[in-house]
Amino acid sequence: MPWDDNNVSKLRELWDQGLPTAQIGKLLGFTKNAVVGKAHRIGLERRPSPIRRTAVKPDRKKARSPIVPKLNFEVKKEEAKEDLAQQTFQPAVNNLFTKSVKRGCEWPEGHPDESDFKFCGKERFEDKPYCIDHCAVAYVIPEKEESEKQQIVQRA
């Protein structure tokens, strides 16, 4: 339904009476937003918002400001050093990753569910987790290097 002169005149009358925009829309057959838009376009007086804002907004700067601790700058240097020595963290559990204990070859022998399951235990090869024999099985040599090694073996 388009806005005609009759609807615009009714809108002006109902607007001046102070009826809510939703009620004006129902009486004229338009939506609330259509009434508000038409009232704005024809220059009717603006109305205050129906939303009541009585709550006081909190000051955001105060809410974000950190609590500044009171610092005591008169502490003697000797006392400060003693406090630091007492506060040094000492772990109760040894770190397994930083220990330099050399373990043997970690190649599993048998099935973990079997009673005779164990690890190889031979001396490790360089920084690998396996001995030289199991390194040969575990690590694949690229084709280029493999052909060079075969040539070296054939010369010897």
Image (cartoon, rainbow, N blue to C red):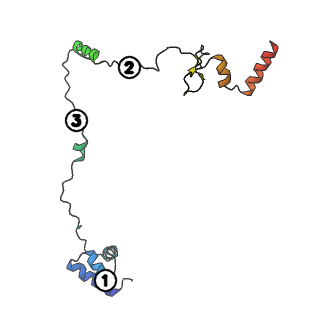
Q: Which mark is residue 77?
A: none
Q: Which one is closest to the eye, mark 2 or mark 1?
A: 2
Whether residue 140 is visible to the viewer of this picture, yes or no, is yes
Dot 3 falls on a residue whose secondary structure is loop
Which residue is label 3 attached to? 67
Position above or below: 89 against 25: above
Q: Residues within 10 Å of mark 1 (few under 14, many from 20)?
A: some
Give the alpha-carbon distance from disc 2 to disc 1, as whole Å: 81 Å
| Front residue of this view, candidates 10 and 81 | 81
Q: Amino acid at mark 3?
A: Ile
Image quarter for residue 89?
top left
- CA distance separating discs 1 and 3: 59 Å
Q: Which residue is mark 2?
A: 93
Q: Position of residue 53 (x, y in %)?
A: 20, 60
Give the residue at x 19% y 23%.
Answer: 72
Residue at 20 percent of width and 80 percent of height = 17
Q: Amino acid at mark 1?
A: Leu
User: Residue 48 is drawn in which quadrant?
Assistant: bottom left
Q: Quadrant of residue 130?
A: top right
Q: Position of residue 152 (x, y in %)?
A: 78, 16
Instruction: Report the residue marked by disc 1.
Output: 28
Left or right: where 137 falls relative to 56: right
* Residue depicted at 28% across the width and 19% down the height: 87
Disc 2 or disc 3, which is closer to the eye? Answer: 2
Pointer 2 or 3: first along the chain: 3
Q: Is residue 36 left or right of residue 75?
A: right
Q: In 3D space, how far apart are the residues under numbered discs 2 and 3 (Cα atoms)?
A: 36 Å
Task: Give the farthest residue toward the right.
Answer: 155
